[in-house]
Amino acid sequence: MATYLERDLRQISSVDSLPDFRRIMEALALRSGSMLNQTEVARDTGISQPTVHRHLNLLEVSSLLTRLPAFSRNRTRRLLKAPKIHWIDPALATYLSGLHDPQAVRLSREAGGLFESLVLLHLQVPASLMVPQPHIFHWRTAGRQEVDFVLERGRTLLAVEAKFTTSPRYGDTKGLQDFMADYPETVGGLLVYDGEDIVRLHEKIVAVPWHVLG
C-alpha cells in the first residue's frame, strides 16, 4: 500500500491528498462486487463526487480496480445498466476492508462481494486464453433478479453465480434459472461455491468449487 500510494500512483498522476485517496480506496473495497454508486461513495467519505470520479479512474488505470459492465441485451425485463466494481486483487480488498483474519472475513457482510471478486479473477484467466475471448458482464433486472457473471462469446452465453457457501442448494440457482429462461441460447449455468465437490443442481446447472476454474 505504501509503495503504491507514495511511488506508483505519483508516476501516473498528481494526487493532492493521499489520505483522501486511501479513504476512497477503503470505501470502494467495502463495495467490491457491488453496483457502483459514486454519489454514495462521495457522501460516505465526505469527498466531492468529481474527486471520487477522478480517483476511481486512477484506480482503474493502475489495474487495481475494474468496472464490470451490465449485460444489456434486453428481452422481456427492464435491466439496470450501472456497472459493478471489482478489485482485481481480492486479498488487497480484504485488507482495505479491515478484515485481517479468516474468521472475520467469513462473518463479515462483505464476504459475498469479496468472494465474487475472487471468482471473477479465476474466470478471467481461462477467458483470456480463449480465441476469440469472451466478454464478461453482470446481469440485474429492475425486479432484482440477478446473475453475477455472464460470459458472452459470439452468440453463446454462459451464466455464472458466485455463492459464498460450503453447501450449495437448489434455491441458490434462482437467478441462473431466471436468466436462462430469458436467454434460451445460454448453454448452461455454473454456481461457483466455497467447497470441494462438483454437484448437479439442475438439468443445466452445476455447482463447482472456485479453485477448479483457474
Image (spheres, rainbow, N blue to C red):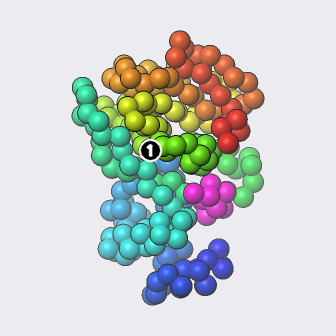
Mark 1 element type = strand
Q: Tell me the residue at 75%/29% (across/down).
A: 196
Q: Name the residue under label 1.
A: 135
The magenta segment = 88-99
Q: Quadrant of the N terminus?
A: bottom right
Picture coordinates of residue 187, whole percent (x, y): 47, 23
Q: Which of 197 and 18 is in front in this view?
A: 197
- Name the residue at the top extreme: 203
Q: Tell me the residue at 53%/85% (across/down).
A: 10
Amino acid found under the numbered disc labelled 1: His
Residue 127, compared with residue 177, is above or below; it is: below
Q: In this view, does 80 lie to the left or right of 200?
A: left
| 130 drawn magenta | no
Q: Quadrant of the C terminus?
A: top right
Picture coordinates of residue 67, whole percent (x, y): 43, 55
Q: Tell me the residue at 41%/69% (across/down).
A: 57
Residue 75, compared with residue 126, is above or below; it is: above
Picture coordinates of residue 131, whole percent (x, y): 52, 43
Q: Nearer the viewer, residue 126 or 171?
A: 126
Residue 68, compared with residue 147, is above or below; it is: below
Q: Residues within 10 Å of mark 1 (few under 14, many from 20)?
A: some
Q: Tell me the residue at 55%/42% (across/down).
A: 130
Instruction: Using the rendered view, name the quadrant where residue 51 is placed.
Output: bottom left
